[in-house]
Amino acid sequence: MTLIAAVDTLNKLIRWVIAAFVAAMVVCTLWQVAVRFLLTTFGWTVSAPWTEELARYFMIWIIFLGAGLACRHAQLIALEIVVQRLPSAMGKVLRYLAIAASVAFYVLMLYLGMEFLEFGSIESSPVLGIPKNWVYWSMPIGFGLMILNTLTLTYEARLRNIDIRVAGQSEEVN
């Protein structure tokens, strides 16, 4: 159970990171709205192009980290009706095959994300001038979390003898 507890602790930390990124994205977006509409009403012409770029980068991180967390409780979009309507044994086999295919896809995307980092080291963002690696790291980290959380979900289902077709779905998110 220590592996499961460690992954769940990591996921709680990542939830806080996501919350901070959402808050930062909201602040950036509100500042952009204030600069474009509120300050121009008072005749102040101020430009803040960095807000749009920074909000976009926060959103990218939120998406990849959030997808990684969603894998822990089987919350990514899926066509569940097929595995639910099949006989139990066939449905379980199909679900394990879907998990294996998903993990294989996540591994491929993690590999491609690592290759993206080569481009990030020579690119910088147009407005902020920061290395694109800060953005590109979201992909391998997100897919790494997807792998970790999918395998943890599968491990927990096997350990607790839970039907893999419903594993993670009835649990409450901590």
Image (cartoon, rainbow, N blue to C red):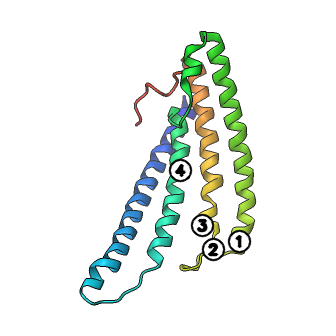
What residue sits 40% from the left and 65% below the top? 24
- Which of marks 3 and 1 precedes in the sequence? 1
On screen, residue 18 above or below 151: below
Q: Residues within 10 Å of mark 2 (few under 14, many from 20)?
A: some
Q: Is residue 169 above or below residue 34?
A: above
In terms of secondary structure, where does tag 2 sit? Answer: loop
The residue under label 2 is which amino acid type?
A: Pro
At horizontal 60% and vertical 20% (from top left) the residue drawn is 158
Q: In x, y percent, where is residue 73?
A: 50, 33
Mark 3 and mark 4: Cα distance apart in space: 14 Å
Kind of residue at disc 1: Ser
- Disc tally is 4
Q: Which residue is mark 1?
A: 121
Check contact, mark 4 vs mark 2: CB within 8 A.
no
Q: Nearer the viewer, residue 155 or 35?
A: 35
The circle on residue 134 is: 3
Q: Residue at x 65, y 30 (%)?
A: 99
Mark 3 and mark 4 lie on one chain; the one further toward the N terminus is: 4
Question: In the image shown, does 65 or 97 lie closer to the viewer?
Answer: 97
Relative side of 172 to 101, left or right: left
**For mark 4, what is the residue?**
65
Quote the CA–CA distance across marks 1 and 4.
21 Å
Which disc, if any, is residue 166?
none
Q: Is residue 2 above or below residue 167?
A: below
Q: Give the spatial CA distance, label 4 vs label 2.
A: 20 Å
Q: What crowding class fits label 4: few (fewer than 14 Cα within 10 Å), some (14-19), or many (20 or more)? A: many
Question: Is there a contact, CB below 8 Å, between mark 3 and mark 2?
Answer: yes
Asked whether residue 164 appears in the rendered view, the answer is: no
Give percent across and percent down for residue 63.
52, 52
Q: Which residue is mark 2?
A: 131
